[in-house]
Image: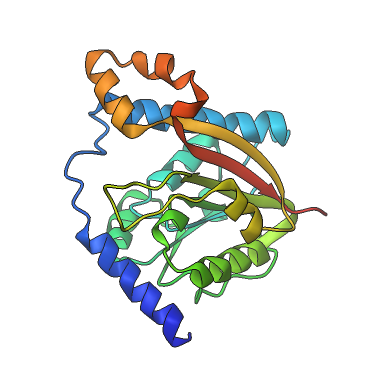
Amino acid sequence: MNLDMRNETDALRERYARRNMGDLYSFTNPDVWQTAQERQRSILSLFSKQLGWKRFDDRRLIEVGCGNGGNLLEMLRFGFAPENLSGIELLEERIIVAKKVLPSAINIYEGDANQIIIETASQDIVFQSVVFSSLLDDRFQIELANRMWQWVKPGGGVLWYDFIYDNPMNPDVRGIKLKRIRELFPEGKIIIKRVTLAPPISRRVCKIHSNLYHVFNIIPLFRTHVLCWIGKSF
């Protein structure tokens, strides 16, 4: 790893260490489970309608930045087989939690995803969820995107969930525009869905009634994230 890449990895650890979200993302908050359920529905719709997949037990998936394992648990509920799931996580404390909650058949790699050895063209799905918005170095983004693309089988793809707008209250993240996604994966055929009601709006309206999430989410401009399938041709 060159010096610039190592510096960005260390900086990323520091940025994550500074975050203290408290119970902001607790599932006891209605805006949190409304957001999660919308994303789950969108992923399942993409798999079944756009891709024509009706079962997932023979699909291999690796998540870059798997955190505490929550997304991998969702994939288990969707029907993925544990032995076909794996994750990569930079922070040791998150890996400890993930290994407690996930089946032992799911392999969790510890370290920088740019340095983890994954077999080329071995994955049907390479998944990232709000990872790239935390990468502030352009070259680091490019290197990681290239590696992720190498891992994808022909006929598979990158499953991408991230926000597209900058957060003026948080200098440790930046929005990833659609133009940037296309720059990172120039060979990919991209399916795009706008999802996720802006968190400041969803927190306020869900305090009144949780179903107001869907009312306000009808307006596309209020959606802050994109769910993308970046497909690799055979």
Residue 185 visible in the shown view: yes
Where does the C terminus fall, quadrant-wise? bottom right
Q: Is residue 121 above or below residue 32?
A: below
Q: Is residue 23 left or right of residue 131?
A: left
Left or right of 75, for residue 110: left
* Residue 6, image x, y percentages: 40, 81
Residue 125 x, y percent position in the rendering? 62, 51
Above or below, 231 against 18 in this view is above
- Name the residue: 28% across, 55% down: 97
Total marks in image: 0
Compared with residue 108, is residue 24 higher up or lower down, i.e. above or below?
A: above
Residue 57 visible to an observer of this rendering:
no
Residue located at (58% from left, 32% from top): 44
Q: Residue furthest right?
A: 234
Q: How is the image coloured?
A: rainbow
Q: Between residues 148 and 57, which one lies in front from this camera angle?
A: 148
Of 139 and 94, nearer the camera is 139
Give the residue at x 32% y 71%: 11
Quadrant in the picture for residue 53: top right
Image position of 136 (left or right of 220): left
User: Camera-side residue: 26 or 176?
Assistant: 176
Q: Position of residue 195 (x, y in %)?
A: 50, 32
Q: Residue at x 42, y 62 (%)?
A: 135
Q: Residue furthest front?
A: 168
